[in-house]
Amino acid sequence: MAGKAHPVSPLAPEGLPELPAIAGVELGAVEAGVRYKGRTDLMMMRFAPGTVAAGVFTTSKCASAPVDWCRANLEKNSNARALVVNSGNANAFTGKAGAAAAKTTAVAAAKLVGCKADAVFLASTGVIGEVLPAEKVTAALPRLATTLKPERWDEAARAIMTTDTFPKAAVRRTDIDGKPVTIVGIAKGSGMIAPDMATMLSFVATDATIPADVLQPLLAKAADKSFNSITVDGDTSTSDTLMAFATGKGATHKPVAKLTDSHFRNFRQAFEDLLVELAQLVVKDGEGARKFVTITVTGAQNAKAARKIALTIANSPLVKTAIAGADANWGRIVMAVGKAGEKADRDKIAISMGGRLVAEKGAVHPRHDEAAATEHFKGTDISIEVDVGVGKGSATVWTCDLTHGYIDINADYRS
Amino acid sequence: MAGKAHPVSPLAPEGLPELPAIAGVELGAVEAGVRYKGRTDLMMMRFAPGTVAAGVFTTSKCASAPVDWCRANLEKNSNARALVVNSGNANAFTGKAGAAAAKTTAVAAAKLVGCKADAVFLASTGVIGEVLPAEKVTAALPRLATTLKPERWDEAARAIMTTDTFPKAAVRRTDIDGKPVTIVGIAKGSGMIAPDMATMLSFVATDATIPADVLQPLLAKAADKSFNSITVDGDTSTSDTLMAFATGKGATHKPVAKLTDSHFRNFRQAFEDLLVELAQLVVKDGEGARKFVTITVTGAQNAKAARKIALTIANSPLVKTAIAGADANWGRIVMAVGKAGEKADRDKIAISMGGRLVAEKGAVHPRHDEAAATEHFKGTDISIEVDVGVGKGSATVWTCDLTHGYIDINADYRS
């Protein structure tokens, strides 16, 4: 991990967007030396009093100590005053010592911010099985706490990176009942990317005023459409964490009472769009990724079945290697549809690539143009559409190809 | 496919064992030119009247035409007089034309053997989505049918290969109530190897007399311990087929009335052993495999949960690449245990590698010797043992590492 620098993903955007301050959020990063040398590895956000938190976490049965910590906090209350995130060490599968290290970190941060420890949220990402050296974190925190500023989103995005080859952030300006509000989010990947949760870490903050009982379902629903709809290698981290913080320190707007309030619609859409953008950035930095792939399944029994089929296609090593080799091998897509275990009518399946019909009614299309399909697969932005012919359920997921780069990165992660 | 010859797997055995004749079975292979040039691609077995068949097939929702054909036959009766298998074309996702091609093949074989078409079993392996050119098969069948002999098992094993780098066969001599009986089986892999079914094709014949209502559960139970306990890449073929044929033409033995007959115990064990050997051979020829990996899970809620956890470890790209890189990365094993979704007590999990304890009670073992674990991972025969600390269920599965070779083979399969 960070032993070798890997070249920046060819799918990376040109740079970070301009990331505005969010009223009520101050943040920054510092070099704590947890594992890496010569780069920042500790990130902190301080939230104004009144900030509300929501979270979606890994489904792993072996969740990390920080995930346990956050879940326990959210069960008690949604009050958030600080977020502390380190990279280089996941503090996962570390037993009681790991839990103690998490608590030590939270207590130290709480003292600096002047709040209770249960208003401090934590995340750790990196190597599994080694207890977080909390003393390195607590030694660095006071220094960090004095330098927090509202505009340091880019530093925060960089400090949480592990094998990521570029920092990931997105911004949306929208409104609630005509009053301007802003959302900024950062994320990091890029291995063990799979539902549920898909990304390892993502943090989103807004200056809007959103009650906890709206923020949590807002986040959960948007996560399904974004981070739970991407996959790199189908593996599930012990540490996946997506959190949202609403400070309520922006322009005063008409109160939001429920998720379906019509004056909340713009915000909901912007929030979901932002999460989709972040999730797609994670895929674009998938380990070894050279192609970005959009898979849309229609005609499934329901949306859940459609997503399962789409993810089975997206996770198939045979489909992913075919894409890597620019081989428009729709037979492997049929294989994956069959493997998904959801209802599909073999004799009605239709498959398109790049919008061009390749197969329909259980057989190759009579005018299938393999050269055109191959040409599409030679590009970096691949789309595959599959109709499974049994219902009206649909879903879109995003993935990348499986290349030699994935093997290179993962066969020497700890060396 | 067969476009490039891949080097023989380093895990291949020295050669085929000596394969004896099975009374009541004549077989052979011929070059039909279905897709490949300069090699045999059509295999036929002729069975004596009275031969009983059993089968276990892919769970894919998009099964191939030959799989549909075999299933329909077995629903009607278990009478088997011939088996016809081609390589190079899977006749899968080929709609009505594919079903017609399968029927044409069966009818032609039935005429040559002098039986009904529903006593002919079929299998096809190779590229998906192209209708089997039945005329090539029916043109070659008469020639093939005149050259069938009891000792041509090795030719049969070679004719069914696709990306396999070595032919696979196994033999067991055992007894039923003291009377000698023989079992011979052949198999082919090597991509799309995953439960359920794990191998693409395997055919086993014995001269014992076994009624259909014993042969089928015998095969199904042994399949669970063998082919359904291996995985190469987690993908599921549309064509996976395992069939057993009992000719009843060997030494006369005490009749077998049920699976649990005590005089049938030796045979059951030998049959299961043979399937395990064949399944392991498939793994040893896994695409790009350089290491053979045995994963044993104990302490699970039940055997099914244990197998699911073991297969999740075995299918994890991150575990498989760590093994490829000789990185004894037990953190990724914890990740996979968590991902499996079965009950596991994080704070009781124990992990051993090569019999040496690496982690226990939710943390790394105090005397964990990373150098020794790495040394074990540098070998070609890796073992990983995981106790998940909640019950008495156990299971063993076999897999291989994920290497650059896998990408090489699969990114240019059709080129």
Image: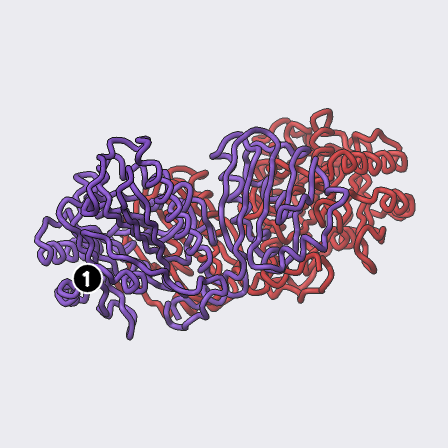
Chain colours: A red, B purple
Relative image position of residue B391 (x, y in whole percent): 56, 29
Residue A63's x, y, as percent? 66, 37
Residue at screen point 39% across, 54% down: A333
Picture residue at 34% right of the left edge, 53% below the top: B171
Q: Specify whether B195 is left or right of A235.
A: left
Residue A111, position in %: x, y?
A: 89, 34
Residue A138 appears anywhere in the view? yes
Quarter-wise, where is residue A214 in the image?
A: top right
State the residue at coordinates (24%, 56%).
B21
The residue nearer to you, when weighing A383 against B10, is B10
Q: Amino acid at mark 1?
A: Lys
Q: Residue furthest front?
A: B178
Q: Please tell me in which quadrant of the rendered image residue B367 appears.
A: top right
Residue B295 in the figure: left or right of residue A87: left
Using the image, determine if residue B359 lies above or below residue A401: above
Disc 1 target residue: B149
The secondary structure type at the circle numbered 1 is loop
Decide which of B25, B202 is in the foreground and name it. B25
Nearer to me, B294 or A164 = B294
